Amino acid sequence: MTGNQYTDKTGETLTVLRDPEQEAFMVRTQGDEVAGRAFFRTRGQDRIFYHTEVDEEFGGRGIGTLLVRGAVEATRAEGVQIVAVCPLVKGFLEKSGEEFAGGWRLPTPDDLSWLQKDVD
């Protein structure tokens, strides 16, 4: 599997790629362990990111931010609009300034209602 590569705070190279089993992006270590996932649902032309998690054993290494960066970069490369429901995704995009400007938006009440029905 190929994906975007990033270096965490320990210097380890991690790979972020789409999870073929789920609507998610995952981050894998050099030892091929899944360290975390960023979950989304697709609605029309939007990719709604609603939850990101990193396993506790990988905490403190900046992996969550790298995972979100990889998911956002891959999504934008596909030309898909990002809807930031997940606080980690929203925070990352707000801090990114102009880098992803115009490529994302906050959820509408309709998005949230749809997501609630789809995820449950």
Image: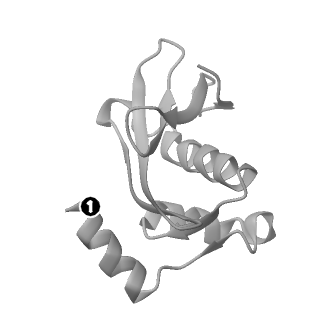
Q: Residue furthest top?
A: 31
Q: Residue furthest left?
A: 120
Q: Quadrant of the N terminus?
A: top right
Q: At 71% across and 68% down in the image, what residue appears?
A: 103
Q: At 63% across and 49% down in the image, what residue appears?
A: 69
Instruction: From the viewer's side, name the closer residue of 118 and 106.
Output: 118
Is residue 98 toward the left or the right of residue 18 in the image? Answer: right
Instruction: From the viewer's side, name the closer residue of 16 and 66.
Output: 16
**x and y percent of residue 70 in the render?**
63, 43
**x and y percent of residue 116 in the render?**
26, 71
Disc tally is: 1
**x and y percent of residue 106 in the render?**
53, 79
Q: Quadrant of the C terminus?
A: bottom left
> Relative to 88, does residue 8 appear above or below in the rendering?
above
> Relative to 85, does residue 60 appear above or below in the rendering?
above
Residue that badge 1 annotates: 119
Badge 1 density bin: few <14, some 14–19, many ≥20, Cα 10 Å: few
Instruction: From the viewer's side, name the closer residue of 9 and 43.
Output: 43
Q: Residue furthest right?
A: 98
> Relative to 94, does residue 24 appear above or below in the rendering?
above
Q: At 51% across and 69% down in the image, what residue appears?
A: 84
Is residue 37 toward the left or the right of residue 100 in the image? Answer: left
- Mark 1 falls on what kind of element? helix
> Relative to 90, does residue 11 appear above or below in the rendering?
above
**x and y percent of residue 60 in the render?**
44, 40
Q: At 46% across and 86% down in the image, what residue appears?
A: 108
Q: Quadrant of residue 57?
A: top left
Q: Amino acid at mark 1?
A: Val
Q: Residue furthest front?
A: 44
